[in-house]
């Protein structure tokens, strides 16, 4: 692996950032007076702040580096994760679901499930979510330690300790507000660090037309049509005709509907940002404001990967090369760090790496703030110590921040020893998450859905996900963690296709099982469901608002723009 | 809540931009072979100073806050 040498100016930039991060934490300390302030920012943030945080909370470094890696592996089709996946889901959660999340005054997504369904549905969601956030933040720490050790030659233990302490300090001091403010800061750093990278890279390869030309050579070299790396839908008719190895139906339903709606509409990590908004209107506009930059992000995070693979395949001996893994294949995960090192002189290099470190830390902080809230409200207050003073829960929020970060560090070290455990856990969480959106959809729009129905549906959906995974195998994989452990009934052309179809099966099973079990059990009383379900909730009146404030109008504008992007890059 | 986020955003962007500009003026220009021959430190530092300044101005006038409501 080629090393990157940092100059003093690069360290100066990194330190300046750290000073600001901690400064924000200390400045916010005196505003943290109640548990509401600590866990929900006192529901007092303007929509543009929660909107940018809504976007950045998901923009951890693994996401950024992973999207660039996929851009290098699969080309522009990676943008399906944004233009079919995230953006329509963000419009849906803003226009249709936020009235229930925000209007119910629930303090968390599991708490909404408690209000709408029952205790066991909440418990199931709270426990799996809490475990998942700790492991995610542990994996994020581990990935950062690995990267900085390999790239800069830093000490692994020192990297983990430094970032854990920084995140610990700013969250215990300023709570959710600290995390949100730092996510907003990270958004601007990512743009500041990556936009010049894209501009320099595009200039270098001769603009978009030069890039298309070079990628045509990459595509045909792999036996695809020349446009396979630069078209979104053109080669999706058949899974074997595109580098993703998926077809259009699996992409639309599996990624576009089940996975993306499941993540953006039900994951407390992102929904928590909208719940911190200062009014119902601001909460509804939060995901919509986030959707505008989200649409543009493929150009910042996917295009660098496309440039990297184009240069690797077509430039001369002294040009850019992606590093190789020990087995001789290209190490796509190093795309972003290598591109930063290739185009940026000292100075800008410091800025680029600071943006990357900022997204590692804020990715971790997002998980930790979601964890401490769910732990304190949905586990500790619900099951361990129900009737304590608010000051006690505020204390517990800080204590569980320390505990959550400690557990993340433990998970990071566990990952260094047993990488398989991490793969296994991520698989289990994927099973648990896949059906969730069916539960919320029925819960919010069908008043007959019951607690028993929801719980049974979730269990059935999780089981269906596991079953489908156990009976299918992506091409070229060994039986085991990749699937087929119950016997191979179907083979998929790629792991991604298998994931999409696992999600489709899980969602369908949960949807049907919830309906059947709900009809078989006694309906909830209507008085108990006011404000929690569509038919029993007063409509928000948007009359008298300017067009740019109306959620429905904003949603339509976003959908029109995203449709245009799909057509332009068809 | 508490502090106006536009101040730290503006402050950080402007300060980083300033560091980049100063470094771009004094550092060895040979290293800009990497960045297609452009002094990217000076150019992008200028962009960041302008962006940071806009945030700081916005936080002083307070108009953006009302508009976002």
Image (cartoon, helix red, strand yellow):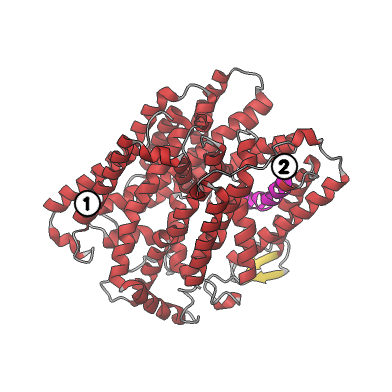
Residue B37: image location, x then y, percent: 19, 65
| Disc 1, SS | helix
The part of the image, by quadrant, that contains residue B64 is top left
Percent from the top left, x then y, of residue A298?
Answer: 44, 61
Report the side of A65 relative to A354 (left or right).
right
What residue is disc 1 on? B46
Is residue A177 shown above or below B53?
A: above
Please tell me which residue is depicted at 68% across the width and 60% down the height of the picture.
Answer: A504
Camera-nearest residue between A180 and A240: A180
Where's residue A8, x and y in %?
20, 46
In this orientation, does residue A403 appear? no
**What residue appears at the point 76 percent right and 43 percent down from the top-left corner?**
A455
The answer to whether residue A550 is magenta is no
Q: Secondary structure at mark 2?
A: loop
Q: Which mark is residue A533?
A: 2
Q: Count the marks: how many? A: 2
Q: Nearer the viewer, residue A488 or A60?
A: A60
Q: Quadrant of residue A321?
A: bottom left
Is residue A439 highlighted in magenta?
A: yes
Is residue A43 found left or right of A434 in the rendered image? left
Q: Is residue A54 left or right of residue A506?
A: left
Would residue A219 be seen by someone viewing this image from the given angle? yes
């Amino acid at each position: 692996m080629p090393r990157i040498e940092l100059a003093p100016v690069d360290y100066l930039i990194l330190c300046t950032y750290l000073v600001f991060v901690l400064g924000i934490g200390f400045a916010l300390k005196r505003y943290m007076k109640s548990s509401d302030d600590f866990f929900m920012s006192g529901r007092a943030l303007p929509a543009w702040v929660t909107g940018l945080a809504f976007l950045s909370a998901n923009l951890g470094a693994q996401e950024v580096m992973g999207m660039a890696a996929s851009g290098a592996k699969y080309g522009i089709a990676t943008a399906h994760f944004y233009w079919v996946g995230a953006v329509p889901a963000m419009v849906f959660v803003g226009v249709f679901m936020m009235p229930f999340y925000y209007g119910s005054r629930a303090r968390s997504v599991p708490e909404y499930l408690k209000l709408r369904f029952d205790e066991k549905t909440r418990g199931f969601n709270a426990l799996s979510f809490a475990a998942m956030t700790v492991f995610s933040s542990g994996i994020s720490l581990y990935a950062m330690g690995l990267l900085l050790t390999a790239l800069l030659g830093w000490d692994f233990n020192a990297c983990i300790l430094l970032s854990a302490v920084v995140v610990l300090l700013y969250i215990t001091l300023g709570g959710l507000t600290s995390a949100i403010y730092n996510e907003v800061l990270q958004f601007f750093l990512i743009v500041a660090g990556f936009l010049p990278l894209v501009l320099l890279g595009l200039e270098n390869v001769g603009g978009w037309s030069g890039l298309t030309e070079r990628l045509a050579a990459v595509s045909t070299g792999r036996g695809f049509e020349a446009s396979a790396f630069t078209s979104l839908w053109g080669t999706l008719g058949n899974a074997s005709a595109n580098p993703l190895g998926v077809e259009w139906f699996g992409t639309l339903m599996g990624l576009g509907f089940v996975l993306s709606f499941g993540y953006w509409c039900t994951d407390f990590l992102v929904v928590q940002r909208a719940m911190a908004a200062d009014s119902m209107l601001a909460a509804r506009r939060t995901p919509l404001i986030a959707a505008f930059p989200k649409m543009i992000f493929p150009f910042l995070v996917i295009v660098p990967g496309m440039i990297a693979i184009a240069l690797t395949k077509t430039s001369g001996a002294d040009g850019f090369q992606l590093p190789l893994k020990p087995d001789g294949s290209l190490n796509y995960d190093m795309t972003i760090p290598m591109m930063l090192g290739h185009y940026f002189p000292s100075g800008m290099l410091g800025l680029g790496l600071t943006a990357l470190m900022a997204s590692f830390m804020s990715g971790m902080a997002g998980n930790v703030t979601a964890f401490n809230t769910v732990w304190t409200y949905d586990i500790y207050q619900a099951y361990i110590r129900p009737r304590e003073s608010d000051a006690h829960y505020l204390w517990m929020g800080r204590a569980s921040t320390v505990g959550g970060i400690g557990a993340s560090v433990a998970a990071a070290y566990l990952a260094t020893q047993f990488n398989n455990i991490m793969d296994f856990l991520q698989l289990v969480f994927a099973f648990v998450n896949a059906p969730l959106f069916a539960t919320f959809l029925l819960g919010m729009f069908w008043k007959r859905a019951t607690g028993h129905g929801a719980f049974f549906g979730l269990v059935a959906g999780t089981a269906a996900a596991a079953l489908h995974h156990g009976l299918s195998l992506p091409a070229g994989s060994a039986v085991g963690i990749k699937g087929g452990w119950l016997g191979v009934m179907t083979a998929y052309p790629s792991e991604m296709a298998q994931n999409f179809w696992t999600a489709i099966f899980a969602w369908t099973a949960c949807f049907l099982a919830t309906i059947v079990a709900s009809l078989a059990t006694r309906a909830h009383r209507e008085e108990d469901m006011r404000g929690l379900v569509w038919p029993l909730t007063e409509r928000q009146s948007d009359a008298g608002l300017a067009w740019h404030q109306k959620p429905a109008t904003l949603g339509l504008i976003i959908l029109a723009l995203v449709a245009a992007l799909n057509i332009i890059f068809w | 809540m508490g502090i106006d986020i536009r101040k730290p955003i503006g402050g950080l962007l402007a300060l980083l931009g300033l560091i980049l500009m100063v470094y771009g003026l004094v550092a060895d220009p040979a290293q800009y072979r990497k960045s297609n021959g452009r002094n990217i430190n000076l150019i992008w530092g200028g962009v960041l100073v302008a962006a940071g300044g806009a945030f700081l101005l916005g936080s002083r006038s307070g108009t953006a806050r009302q508009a976002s409501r």
